[in-house]
Amino acid sequence: MIKRLPVAIIAVLMLGGCGEDSSTADDASAPAETTAETEAAAAAPALPRTPSVPGAGVFFITPADGDTVTNPITVEFGIADMTVAKAGDNTPQSGHHHLIVDAELPDFGQPIPASEHYIHFGDGSTSTELNLTPGTHTLQLLLGDHLHIPHDPPVKSAPVTIVVK
């Protein structure tokens, strides 16, 4: 049987590692979710979502779709019609970036998972450097609210495909 934690405890657990400096991390050592965590997330009811600003968006300044790059890869995030705030900061019309690497968009009714595929920038940063294996990779941005839950409607970028030499 899986025990469900109160939302306040989940929020504290999610915010625990979000103040870390992610500007130069390659995040390849981040632990992946376990099967039990994945099953618990799938069984959890949708959480309340913060409204986004109509027309708001996030996008990549670099790299551009189709770019061929070398490690370390500089990734810069842009935002339009909303502002960036640190995780835990419930400023209206704000959120913080999450970089999705080679994965699908997560469940919009749950906090964005943290793994090597879902990199959190709860410190409010708007750029990072990544080291990816040679080959083709897909990147996408998703803005999360103060509790890492995607806004309603979600503020997400178009996916960007890059080739790492």
Image: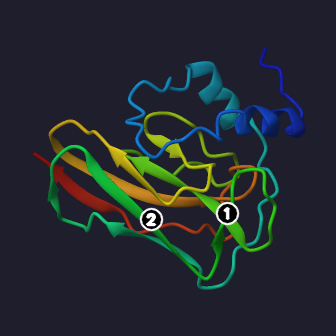
Q: Residue 95 shows which numbered tag?
A: 1
Residue at horizontal 76%, vertical 31%? 13
* Lateral position of residue 27 relative to residue 131, left or right: right
Q: Residue 9 placed where, x, y %?
A: 86, 32
Residues packed near mark 1 inside 10 Å, few (<14), some (14 to 19) or many (20 plus): many
Q: Residue 85 placed where, x, y %?
A: 68, 62
* Lateral position of residue 40 relative to residue 29, left or right: right
Residue at horizontal 40%, vertical 42%? 24
Q: Single out the residue that lies furthest toward the top.
A: 1
Q: Is residue 5 visible?
A: yes
Q: Residue 25 placed where, x, y %?
A: 42, 37
Residue at horizontal 65%, vertical 34%? 17
Q: Residue 77 shows which numbered tag?
A: 2
Q: At label 1, which amino acid type do we have?
A: Gly
Q: At label 2, which amino acid type do we have?
A: Phe
- First along the sequence among labels 2 and 1: 2
Above/below status of 59 relative to 25:
below
